[in-house]
Each structure stands twice: as C-alpha cells, then as structure tokens.
Amino acid sequence: MQFMLLFSRQGKLRLQKWYVPLSDKEKKKITRELVQTVLARKPKMCSFLEWRDLKIVYKRYASLYFCCAIEDQDNELITLEIIHRYVELLDKYFGSVCELDIIFNFEKAYFILDEFLLGGEVQETSKKNVLKAIEQADLLQENQNEDWGGLSDDIL
Amino acid sequence: MCVADTARDVSGNAHCKSKEAEIKRINKELANIRSKFKGDKALDGYSKKKYVCKLLFIFLLGHDIDFGHMEAVNLLSSNRYTEKQIGYLFISVLVNSNSELIRLINNAIKNDLASRNPTFMGLALHCIANVGSREMAEAFAGEIPKILVAGDTMDSVKQSAALCLLRLYRTSPDLVPMGDWTSRVVHLLNDQHLGVVTAATSLITTLAQKNPEEFKTSVSLAVSRLSRIVTSASTDLQDYTYYFVPAPWLSVKLLRLLQCYPPPDPAVRGRLTECLETILNKAQEPPKSKKVQHSNAKNAVLFEAISLIIHHDSEPNLLVRACNQLGQFLQHRETNLRYLALESMCTLASSEFSHEAVKTHIETVINALKTERDVSVRQRAVDLLYAMCDRSNAQQIVAEMLNYLETADYSIREEIVLKVAILAEKYAVDYTWYVDTILNLIRIAGDYVSEEVWYRVIQIVINRDDVQGYAAKTVFEALQAPACHENLVKVGGYILGEFGNLIAGDPRSSPLIQFNLLHSKFHLCSVPTRALLLSTYIKFVNLFPEIKTTIQDVLRSDSQLKNADVELQQRAVEYLRLSTIASTDILATVLEEMPPFPERESSILAKLKKKKGPSTVTDLEETKKERSADMNGGTEPAPVNASAVSTPSPSADLLGLGTGPPPNAAPAPASSGSLLVDVFSEPASAVTQLAPGSQENFASPDLASSELVSEEPSEAARGADELTHKFVCKNNGVLFENQLLQIGLKSEFRQNLGRMFIFYGNKTSTQFLTFTPTLICSDELQSNLNLQTKPVDPTVDGGAQVQQVVNIECISDFTEAPVLNIQFRYGGTFQNVSVKLPITLNKFFQPTEMASQDFFQRWKQLSNPQQEVQNIFKAKHPMDPEITKAKIIGFGSALLEEVDPNPANFVGAGIIHTRTAQIGCLLRLEPNLQAQMYRLTLRTSKETVSQRLCELLSEQF
C-alpha cells in the first residue's frame, strides 16, 4: 500500500499515512485530487478505480471516507477488508467510533494503525493482539499520569 | 487527557464560525507555542509534550508547521512512555526524510532498540518503518535482521522488525546486506504465531522478487502453510479467522509470494494444485455468512489464487475452471466483483489455454459495455473486449466498440479510438472494412482521432493498391456531408490528391467536382489542413490537366499569395510557379504518386502502450509533444519529391535516427497477402530494416555472436552498479549473461544524441516466447532523457539473436540510469530479468582541446564553490598511467598534455551536450603512488554535472 487517507464528506482530511517518500507539495496535490475524485462518485459505484498508475480502493463509513492507494499487483478485495478491520479496531477501542473520536484522539488512531499496518503491509490481523498492544501502552500512560496528578490544566 | 484537551483548545470548532476566525486563532496559538519554546525558562517534559502535541494537531488540521522538531526529538529520549510516544508520532508524521535531525533521531532510536524493552523497541521500529530514510537504512539495516532472527525476540517485535526491514529494503536495497539471516527469515513461514508469519511473508515476497535464488526454499514452506490454512476448519485459527474465512490476509500474501516463482517441483506442485482446487471448490459452496466481509475475504483469496493460476499458465484444467468462475462473477449483483472479474479475465485472455474459454463470454461483456452504470466498470469491459479480440470476432467487437463510442464518456474516448484503430488494422482481411471503420471513427469521434490514426490509414491505403479506388470513393462520399470533421478533410484531401484519378471517370465525381468539394471546406480549416489541401491542389494539376487553370486561379488569389501565414504563402507561391514553368514530364516526376511506406510497427500501438503504461498522467504532456515532433516523418503531408520546392519538414528528426529508410529508398514491400498483419507479428523485421537505411553515422551494427561470447562471461552475479561502472568508459560489451540469455551492447553517441543496439542472444536450443524487453525510466529521468525504441519479435528461436535499437536523446543532465526489464517464457516458466542500462551522463561528452593558458583561464572562471566537486579515494586498480589515460579518453573528455606543471597529473576538458544546455567541464586527476590514492577535481558550470561526473569517474581507477 502506498498511502491511506481518511477524509470527511466535506473533504476535510482527518488522517493521512504515507508509506512512500513524497514531498509535502505532492502529498497535498494527491490529497486534493483524490478527495475530489472520490467525493464525486455515486453511492452504488464500485469501490475501485484506476488513478495514475495506482489502484484506489475506498469505502465510506458514515461521514468518513477511507481511501487506500495500492499497486498494480495488490489485491483490491483484501484491501477493502483492511479498511474494514481498521474500522472495527477503532470501533472496539473507542466504543462505536465517530468522526469526532478520530479528530480529538488522532494520536490513538495513528497508534492503532501502526500496530495493524506497518510500512504499508499488514502486520497483525488479530483484533485481540492489536488492542492488547494499545491497552498495554495506555496502561503505561495511566501509571505515569498519576505522578502528574494536578497538572492537566490548560494555559490557553 | 492531554491530547484531547489540546484538540479542543486548538480547534475550538464550536467557537470558530468562519475560516478566518480559525486561522486567526491558530496563528495566535502558534505564536504562543513558539514563545514557550524560545523562552528562557526550560520547559519540563510534560509541557514540551503538550505543545508538540498541539503542533501536531494544527498540522493535521491542514496548516504548515515549520518548528518544534527539536522539542520532539528531545521527547524521544524521555523515559516517560507518553512523552516518547508523542515525540515519535511527531517525527513520523512531520519529519521528511532529508532532515538533518535524522542523526539525533537515530541516536534516540539506537538507545530504544538496545533497551530490551519491547514497548520502546516497538516505538523505535515503527518510527524507522514510517520514516524509512536512507540515513536510517545506513544506521539500522545491519542491526534489524539480527533483532528479527534472534531467538529471544518477542513476537510483536519480530513482526515490526520484519516490516521495518521491508521498508528499508524498498528505500535502499543496496544497504540491506543479504546473509545468514535470510535462511532463518524463510523459516519464519513455519512460525507458530500467525502474526509473525503474516509480517514475514511480506518481507520474504519483496526480497524474493530481487533475489529469487536466495529465497527459493520459501516455495515449499509457503505451500504447506497455505495448505494447512485452506484445509483448516473455520474455528481452528481463532482470532485469525475473519468472518468464517481462515487467515485471508495471510493466504493472499502466501499466494502472492508463490507468484515470484515458476510452478514448483512435481511433489510440491501436487499439493499446491490441491490447495488451488480447494479454493475454487469453496467458491461454489453456499456462503457461511451473509455479511459482505465474508464474501469479500473469501473472494480476495479466490482472485489471488486465480492470479497464481494465470501466472503459472501451465494447468489447462485450472485455467478453464478459473475462467468459468470469473464468468459467474461477470453477472454477479456486486459491482465490485463484476469489475474484478472483467479485470482478471483480461489477463486470462492472453493465455493460449483459456483464450477460447474467455471468448465464450463475449455477449456478457458487450452487455456490460451497454448497461454498466459505472464508467470504471465500462472501461474494464472495453479492455477485456480488446484482449479477447481475434480474427473470428473482430468485426463484432469493432462494431460494438464503435457503437459504444457514440455515447462513451469523454475520459475514455481517445483510448477507445486507438483500440478500434488497432483492432481494425490488425484483423482486417478485407481492407474496405478497415477504411470504413476508420472513417466511421472520424465521423463519430473526430476530435479524439489523433494524428497517428489518420496517418496510419493513409500509409495503409498507399501501400495497398487493392483498396485505393475504394478509399477514394468512400472519402469522396463522406466529404459530401455538410459538416464533416477536419480530420476527414485531411484524409480526404490526401487520398484524393493521390488517387482521385481512380474515380474521376464517374461524372458524379469528375475532377472539377472533386476540387470544388475540397475547396468548399478550405476556409473552415486550420492552417496545417489548408497547407495539406494546397499540396492536394498541386497534385491535381498533375492528375487532371483539364482543371489546371481553375487551380492556378485559386493559388493566384490574394488570399493565398498574400496570406499572412508564411507556410501557406510559400506553398501557394511555389506551387503556382511550379505549375506555370514546369513541363508535363517534370510535373509528372515531381508530383508522382507517393511510394509505399516502409513497414514498421504501428505508431498507434506505440501510442496506446504509452497511454496505458506506467505514470500515465505525467506522460500526457510528452505524448502531446511527440505528436508534433516524432510522428512518421514520411507521412508529413508534403507530397512533393523534388527538393527544389519542398519545405523542410519541421518534424524531420535529428540525424534521421527516429525513422526508417527514406521513402524513396524504401524497398517496395511485395504485396503479399498479409502484409499488414506482418507488421504486427514480426516487428523485429522492421527493426532490422532500420539499419541499412540510416546508418551512415554509425559503424555497422553487425555484431558477430562470437564476439559477444568472447567477453567476460556471467556478469549476472555482479552488482548492478558495478556493471554500469564497467560501461562508463566503453560502449560495447556484454551487459548480462545467465544460462539462458546473453545481452550484448553496442552504442554510439554524438553530441546530445545516441543510439544503442541491444543484442539478445538465446543460449538455449528452445524458443523463448512472449519475449518482451521494456525500458523503465523514473518520471524524473524521463524528463531528462528521451528513449525511443520498438518492440522486438516476441519469439526468439533457440540459438538465435535478436537486436533492438534504442534512440537516445539527452534533454538535460541526469543521474539515474534507465532499467531494462526483460520478460519471457522459457519452456513453460516465466523469466524476468532486470539490468541497469549503462547510459551515463559522460556519454554526451565531446572532447575539447585547449592550450595550457586557456585551460587555466577557464579553470579560474569556474571558481564558485558549487561548481567544483572534489573526491579523494583509494585506488582500486593498479595505478598505470597508460590505462588511466585510456580511461579518461574513454570517459569522453580530451586528455590535455603539458597543462599541469606536474607531469604525473592528468588534465581533461570537454563539453557535455544536452538539448537544453551545453556544459563546459574541466577535470584534474592527481595520483599519489605512495599512498595509493587519487584526488579528482571536477569544475563545470553546473553543480549537478560536476557532482555526477565526479561520481562516475571516481569509480574507474
């Protein structure tokens, strides 16, 4: 997989993950182009399309579009299920996930993704194992936060 | 929780009603963070984390962030997990791979990898995999394989290490050393933990593609793993079962790994065939769940299995079963499955075992073209129709495509036009059908008919006298339409100018009527078309003396003779003069019918390949350029043979490298029945024809095969870069050799142009089939180096040698080398070879002799620090002055004697020629015999050129 983008129906990018080195300018251009292309497609259309020399696999969940770019040899259907499994992971972690969860807990969305996909390839498909890794990390976090009890204030 | 608070603070979505308000708020926040970072008071870890997190959030909202990196790097070395974690996240998302911070980051990573704390190790590995820069590869490519195969590494760390290594291998394959660890990695396929197997399989697949020998034991292991998975009950694999499908991701990966290899040995093969049959059988079973996830996962495995069956292309039974399965999907209610079935069938259509089976689905595919609501699905249907077309169904398929063209989406019209044109030509038995088809194309989609298409119909009509009368009659009739496309006027003008006499006997198409008909379109046409029509008129003067005065009157009119366009004016003046002073004999000679065009690969096919090839988007611009610059020079519509009046064709290509022999010299092709088909099935003959036509500038390309063999054998084992280095100072030699294939090179360069002959020798006694060499350039290289070539004959007989010519133009200086990829079938197995083609910048050197005084004057002029590049290096070969001299000359520069006061030093000068610039280059090489070292100094007017030449030359001594 070359990259994964999450964006809203309004075209707002919510998460981006790039597995190939690209300049910021290129990333922005690709994002703009793809968001436009995908949003223009009708609901019953097929989930795959050719774009440049890549294959795009996308799926909409409520207000969010999940969009992956894969290479010619890669398998479209299994990519569709990569998206679904990621959504399941988010759902399980947040408890019926919504767009706001991803906005306000973006770092969790990234950590979960890194446990599931690494370098553009599936690393661990077991839901249990992925969530176990995240929960362990959360545990570390909790333990340390205790030391800082009174400090979670805000300066803004 | 800090992060969530941060997010709410910064975005304040509820409060920011307008975009401006949001920007204002964010700028205020950025200023605040900046002042905190710059403040005198050192921030504690918690605040640092908080602000870094805010920056990250602002970046993800779509704003640019240009600070905070240092603070993020500081967080990496914190012992607190949350701080470290946010530091790593910031680095992964925001640091580009060139950052100078990488060294600091690498240090932190190194500590975490050594910490033996699996959570920290995981973070560090994820960061390497996310950034994946070359600097990271340099630092960790040696270390990670050790972590990966160490006995005491935790499973989750192993998984990360495998994919981390994969990412580094993709970025910098040269930095990942193969070694003992590879065999241990292969055995991870047997690991108990399915997550480890899943990660390792991706790594092994990528490594096996480049080093098949090293990883070939993975085949039997992958087959037994796959076999265990597909025969397991749906609950056996516990959490690795996904909607009742056992380990679908791993299955797909294993099937993909097997596609790196030819069919395995009989024992393993039997087991694999069983697996594939099981997968095909399961597709027929009733679904275990109604959820789409179940059918998607199951079918993902099925499609990957079909890909493997097609890749092996050796089991007719499986191929036909695969085809039937896809046939069912063609009518499935899921759009996704219909799309994939069409796509997959396209590759099946090219297998001899399944071509016929694919053809039976023609009606369904045609129906898809008519009824699918999604353009991407219709596109797949067009592709499949094109792939399944052969002589038996060409008329039907072409007719359906033409039908569809009337309503087709604009985005795919040009491609359909090209496909129709190719099929019509390839499978034409009756050329009147071909002419009708092309004229229909112009009528239906004239705007999408590129020049290649109408040039081609003219070439064919001129080369086949049995169709000329019909063509003249048909274009004449088509031109009767009140509004016809300009492309039709072009074709009509050209054909009537050549063959109007064949229909002039009919009073309904008398010379005057033909002329009036054409001239009625004249004023509506663009300048190039008008220029073509003027040439038609002068041809009419010769064909039909009775309307000479009418034509002269037209040429003489002010609108022609005083036309503002120089080209039109010149044609009018010259043609008028020619028609007035030349005798009938001279006219007849000068304006004689065009000689047949040399046979060559259809330029339309080349164009389609280009269109469908990689990086389609970036190619578009270039394709457009080429349309004017490279199109068949011979068909430029100036049908006048005498040089006295011919205007120099703007499309004539430099050195005549791009085209075949000039039309006059063309050996008239015998009108054998299947002339055109030959063009396609034996493109190699077109290539060999090239040589006698335009080789004055080059030495004879006949390279005796004995000469090829006498070179050092088997260089396959050598590193790719080393190979390129070998050719830096010479132009001929063996580029590649293994047991099957030998590739020899012979090349010539002058100024910014070059020509390379590639000789493919089949060392076996068996035919190579579907022999396809392809040149691959990155987008960047493509814009700097223009390569053109023609396909070679797909069949190479045992012991035979085929040659391919590559025409080269250097547009601007470049660093990379193009890659030559060769794919073919040998005795049922698929072979794939990739070598770098040694086209290096120094090939475009022209030596410049100069005196000592001049040399030093120029040397001083190039004293800018960017202009000079210096390298001090150890001698790799014996330091023999004579060999050194020969190498400098071979490198392309002049060797200047008596310039350097120290006679032991070498001094050279030359000019690098590119299309866009000429770059003067000076060089000095100082050997130090005692230390066995050299110092090489390059000065040129362009930094990148100095850099590249210094790299190239440093490798030679």
Image (tube, rainbow, N blue to C red):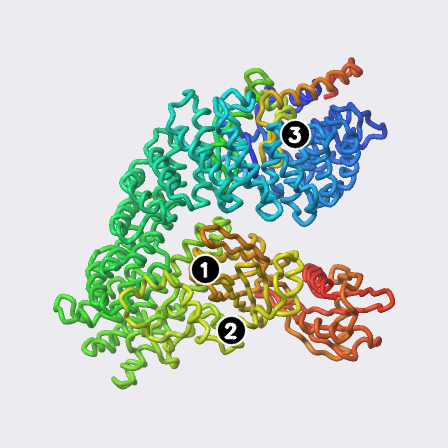
Name the chain under label 2: B
Q: Quadrant of the C terminus of chain B?
A: bottom right
Label annotation for residue B766? 1
Point 22% across, 77% down: residue: B549
Q: Helix, strand, or loop for circle 2?
A: loop
- In the rendered image, which residue does mark 3 sit on? B58
Amino acid type assigned to the residue bearing label 1 in the image: Thr
Query: Which of disc 3 and disc 1 is earlier in sequence?
Result: 3
State the image coordinates of residue B899 (x, y, percent, origin top left). Answer: 79, 77
Task: Determine if marks 2 and 3 fall on one subunit.
Answer: yes
Task: Say which of marks 2 and 3 sits in front.
Answer: 2
- In the rendered image, which residue does mark 2 sit on? B701
Task: Say which of marks 1 and 3 sits in front.
Answer: 1
Binning the other alpha carbons within 10 Å of mark 3 as few (below 14), some (14 to 19) or many (20 upward) gives many
Point 69% across, 27% down: residue: B54
Query: Which of disc 3 and disc 2 is earlier in sequence?
Result: 3
Labels 2 & 1 near each other (Cβ < 8 A): no
Name the chain under label 3: B
Please, is residue B148 above or below residue B820 in the view? above
Q: Helix, strand, or loop for circle 1?
A: loop
Task: Say which of marks 2 and 1 sits in front.
Answer: 1
Q: Which of B69 and B313 lies nearest the eye of the viewer?
A: B313
